[in-house]
Image (cartoon, grey):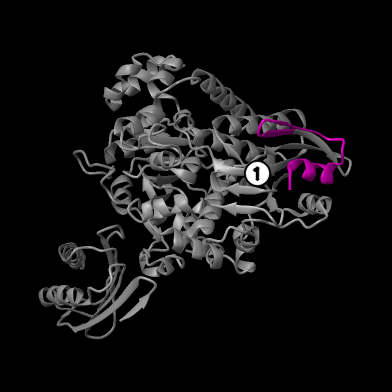
Amino acid sequence: MNGALPGRISYAECSARERIARLFDAGSFREWLPPAMRVMSPHLAQLGVPAAFDDGVAIGEARLADRRVFVGAQEGEFMGGGVGEVHGAKLVGLFKRALRDRPDAVLLLAESGGVRLHEANAGLIAVSEVMRALLDTRAADIPVIVLIGGANGCFGGMGIVARCADQLVISDIGRLAMSGPEVIEASHGVEEFDSRDRALVWRTTGGKHRFLVGDCDQLVEDDVQAFRDAAVRALDASRPLTLQSLQDEHAVLTQRLRAGEGAEDAIDLWEGLGIAHARAVPHMNAEQVRTLRQESVA
Amino acid sequence: MSMAAGLETLHYNFTGTQAVGAFAPVLVGVVGSGNLEVLLEPSPGPACRFEVQTSARGFGNIWEAVLRDFHSRHPLAGVVVAIHDMGATPAVVSLRLAQAAAALP
Amino acid sequence: MKWTEVAAQLFGSEHAIRADGEFLSGSATFDGQAVAVVGSTNHAPIGYALALRQAEVVLDTIDRHPGRAIFLLIDTQGQQLRRHDELLGINRAMAHLGCCIDLARRRGHRVIGLVYDQALSGGFITSGLIADACDALPEAEIRVMRIPAMARVTKLSEDVLTALSESNPVFAPGVQNYLRMGGVRALWQADLPAGLRDALAHAAIDDRRAIDGRARGGRLLAATVVEQVLAA
């Protein structure tokens, strides 16, 4: 089947549109509300910021290994991938359309700082609406798969949205969290979180950590083909939300709270969770971390 | 030329000789710091129109020079070029325009 | 208004809502029906642990009290800004709370949120904002972020943001504004029981905020863009 090109292509370095072009079956993407329609933010001009023709997100349908999927890809370079009124509404529309047209899955290529602060209130409500629409889609048994691997990571309200999905795929250089290190440092000082300590940032919010503790289902290298293969694997791994599944989740999160008591660093938490070779994790590659999780986690 | 709370809008018109005809809109680039996006669409008539919206104000002369230079090498006719710019250098602007032109049929 | 006053006006003196630090939980009777209550006070920062405690109440309600309405009392300064919470996965804990509330709604529990003092984004995005209705007291305040932090992240000056917060609906923190944008369903006037009664009876079970925002004139594009996507 067609798809990504041979040889490694950095997913992080691709734009949102390049990711779509390379990840899905060649030429299969059909965009809704394309740039020429100029469905743009009405709120940016007053702040002296240029709008983007697609408001930083491309949505549409495509084929993935010949399966029909819907896609939303956030452009991290535009406003940090922040969700504004129009951007959010495009994603809500994507999910609502999925409810109607029932594709095999909705794939969200997430790269975002969360609420687009330049649109403040409108952005906050928009993220909330995306969350509701995503959960509606899951409740209708349509899987929602989130891919995380952009340089800007997946933060803020989008970090929560991502964890509302069925399946998460993250690269070792990807990041998933809520508040960014800079915000935490600004709030509580550099002793709380030194945002320039890259190793610390990645131990705390990076893909290897999130995969090891189970916040993400698949860990890949920073490679478009690896993301494509992982996305295909995720297509049939959907999990419905039931009272039982939420009670199980609650138990996992409660245990983690206890295991992490007094943990100064991710390494302490990994040890507390019974993960072997915790100290070596920051130096491991994706494949080694995948093996480690298989061996360590029940 | 008009300004709206920091954004500058610039318009340029050149007469082209290389008619492109009908084509699906072409988008290159991204609106990020030091970057720009360029949207090419077909337009009736012989003109090649440029509509620039930029957050870097006061560079009208440079824009004119860069666009004129581009059009001298790609004398497109029947095209409108819409640009959202966030402070790209002339080199980056020229690059994006060349990429856009290369994507035309 | 203090939560104790809100509770007294809604439920009288005989309710079983207790504060454990900043965490509120318990039950009460309203119009003859039992109501589960959960929330926070003292402008609590919502961290991993507090998100879990709230989720536990919701799960317990689903499990042991089918159909019981859930009332969220919201007063928060936003998400807890600590490295430890990020390490543990505060985004996952918050998503879990949101999924629990979402399940409760699908199982027929009415979920009504009330911002009775203040709410900042991360503090209520998976509680009040995922309920059937997020209502508010008229004097409450809703913000995305405090201006100094916003200035640092956006690189817009505090002066510019302050001016915008006074004049521009997208930035102004007042609940009237959120009402107009559809983010808040209704403001409760002096008769609080009437407010809760109305919410329980009339809050939609689907997400009508974009439609409300357009109808009320505060958020004109969202609903239209959704319709455009459906028609594309």
Q: Position of residue A180 (x, y in %)?
A: 41, 41
**In the picture, residue B44 is in which quadrant?**
bottom left
Per the image, label 1 sits on a secondary structure element best described as loop
Question: Which part of the image, by quadrant, shows the N terminus of chain B?
Answer: bottom left
Residue A284 sits above or below residue A65 on the image: above
Report the front residue among C37 and C96.
C37
Q: Which residues are magenta?
A: C1-25
Q: Residue at x 77, y 31 (%)?
A: C65
- Seen in the picture, residue C64 relative to B69 is either above or below; the reply is above
Residue C4 lies in magenta, yes or no? yes
Q: Residues within 10 Å of mark 1 (few under 14, many from 20)?
A: many
- Residue closest to the eye, C196 or C85: C85
Residue at mark 1: chain: C
* Amino acid bearing label 1: Asp
Q: Residue C104 falls in which quadrant of the image?
A: top right
Residue C6 in sight in this render = yes
Expressed as whole percent of the image width and height from the top left, the position of residue C32 reads: 89, 41
Q: Which residue is under mark 1?
A: C75
